[in-house]
Amino acid sequence: MKALYWLKLWVVLMLVFFSTAAAQADNPKVEVSYLRGPHISFHVGSTHPLRDLDSLADANIHARLNLDYSFTTYLRLMLMFGINQFTAESYLNVEHPRWNNVSLNCKALFPSPSGTPLRYYVQAGCGYYLPKTGNNEIGLNIGAGWQIPLNAPFSLEFGLDYHHIFTDDPTQFLTWQLGVLFR
């Protein structure tokens, strides 16, 4: 039942993202042609456990590869391949938990109100999460951050993502990351 609720929420968020980004597509103020089309990005950062996972593990590394397609300057569809490693508490004598994920996300970018090249974003998606041990699960993620365009065709991206995996006792964690986007 909870999975159905989260799926409905994800659909509503995607509709909001698409409609907002489509409305902004008519704004020529920040329109840069190299921002459209296919992109690739690599992100590194840290993974921070939440709730029950926090009592079993500590933060560790997060790495992700994104394959993006920009429909407009403000709307992207992304295929994300991530690894989220945790460090098990030493007194538990268990392996370090790890979740790999493949997710399909939509990202909406918003221009800075000040007119600078800085752009804010929100993204959300669902995916398949594969643990180091145990059963594969479906999960959702939602994130926000900002992008700083550098000399074409590069951008830096800073972000925070929340992941919710539909295990019996839901697995939740945050990822902080720095990414380099290039075309």
Image (cartoon, rainbow, N blue to C red):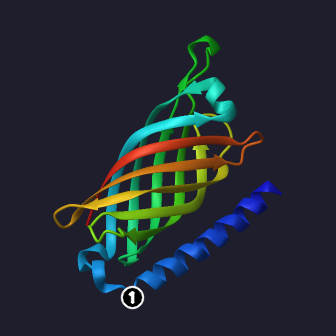
Taking depth in this image into account, of 102 and 151 the one nearest to the observer is 151
Q: Which residue is drawn at 58% across and 75% down?
A: 16
Q: Residue at x 60, y 54 (%)?
A: 128
Q: Residue at x 67, y 40 (%)?
A: 171
Instruction: Pick out the residue farthest to the right.
Output: 1
58 w.r.t. 114: above or below:
above
Taking depth in this image into account, of 64 and 106 the one nearest to the observer is 106
Q: Where is residue 90 in the image (x, y as percent from the top left)?
A: 56, 14
Taking depth in this image into account, of 12 and 40 the one nearest to the observer is 12
80 w.r.t. 57: above or below:
below
* Image side of residue 85 versus residue 163, left or right: left
* Image side of residue 37 versus residue 129, left or right: left
Quadrant where the image shows the N terminus: bottom right
Q: Crowding at label 1, few (<14), some or many (≥20) Cα neighbours within 10 Å?
A: few
Instruction: Pick out the residue farthest to the front.
Output: 114
Q: Residue at x 59, y 45 (%)?
A: 130
Instruction: Pick out the residue farthest to the bottom.
Output: 26
Q: Where is residue 21 in the image (x, y as percent from the top left)?
A: 47, 78
Residue that mark 1 sits on? 26
In terms of image quadrants, where is residue 93? Answer: top right
Q: Which amino acid does label 1 sit on?
A: Asp
Taking depth in this image into account, of 130 and 88 the one nearest to the observer is 88
